Amino acid sequence: MKIIMLGAPGAGKGTQAKMIADKYNIPHISTGDIFRANIKGGTELGKKAKTYMDQGLLVPDELVVDLVVDRIGQDDAKNGYVLDGFPRTIPQAEALTAALNKIGDKVDFAIDVDVPDSNIIDRMAGRRACVSCGGTYHIKFNPTKVENVCDACGGELILRDDDKPETVQKRLTVYHEQTQPLIDYYTKEQILKSVDGTKDMSEVFQAIVDILGE
Ligand code: AMP
């Protein structure tokens, strides 16, 4: 099963993507996580990506597409994957369609986690990310067992630079301009499914399972 997660930054698509990956036993491929790992590792890619990410801008398509095409070609992705944060622009979506076409393959579902902007700003301020493993939490909606300590690895939790309110506003503008057109793109491809992302995490997940099947 090959799945794309769509939705504004902060809509909760990363959390849902992880739950999908666990349930269906497919890798969770997050371009944001890949960039953050590269930033942490001090790679050339990380250095380039950081200048865009810190401003709430998208990393240029040419730095993203090959990376994803390469990742989905790896062995663990043979039976499917859930893409989180990619594609984010029409050229990225077209590149993905073309790369899959070449091997006679296609995406099965594009799931849009729909949340209005007004909810997003509040949510992002409560978001926390683990500096060690990249795990994400929310102080209200998805708290850790011990405050500021990652449940998964014990790492320290922080408010990511790109989750700060001024950056969030910029990211939402970028989302509406560059990523929202993908809703039309995947509607035309007849694989778009929308879920109400304002509901509880577990309710959103159930709605997704209803779409994907048990
Ligand atoms: P995320 O964790 O998915 O919200 O991504 C964090 C940041 O990484 C974004 O605001 C972008 O700057 C960058 N990024 C992640 N995925 C992409 C992508 N597919 N295209 C361009 N930039 C991306």
Image (cartoon, rainbow, N blue to C red):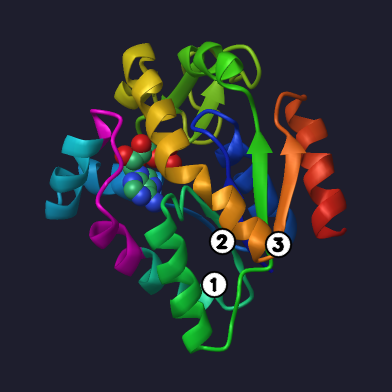
According to the image, label 2 marks what residue? 27
Tag shown at residue 77: 1
**Is 54 included in the stretch rendered in magenta?**
yes
- Proximity of marks 2 and 3: CB atoms separated by less than 8 Å: no
Kindly identify the residue that appears in the image at 31 percent across and 58 percent down: 64
Q: Is residue 177 above or below residue 24?
A: above
Q: Looking at this rendering, what residue extends furthest in the bottom direction?
A: 103
Quadrant containing the C terminus is bottom right
State left or right for residue 25 relative to residue 166: right
Which amino acid is tagged 1? Ala
Q: Give the extent of the magenta segment.
A: 53-67
**Is 171 included in the stretch rendered in magenta?**
no
Which amino acid is tagged 2? Pro
Residue 177 position, x and y percent, is 41, 38
According to the image, label 3 marks what residue? 191
- Proximity of marks 2 and 1: CB atoms separated by less than 8 Å: yes
State left or right for residue 11 relative to residue 102: right
Determine the secondary structure under disc 1: helix
Determine the secondary structure under disc 2: loop
Determine the secondary structure under disc 3: loop
Q: Of tags 1 and 3, which is closer to the observer?
A: 3
Which amino acid is tagged 3? Ile
Which is nearer the N-term, disc 1 or disc 3? 1
Q: Residues within 10 Å of mark 2 (few under 14, many from 20)?
A: many
Kindly identify the residue that appears in the image at 60 percent across and 76 percent down: 106
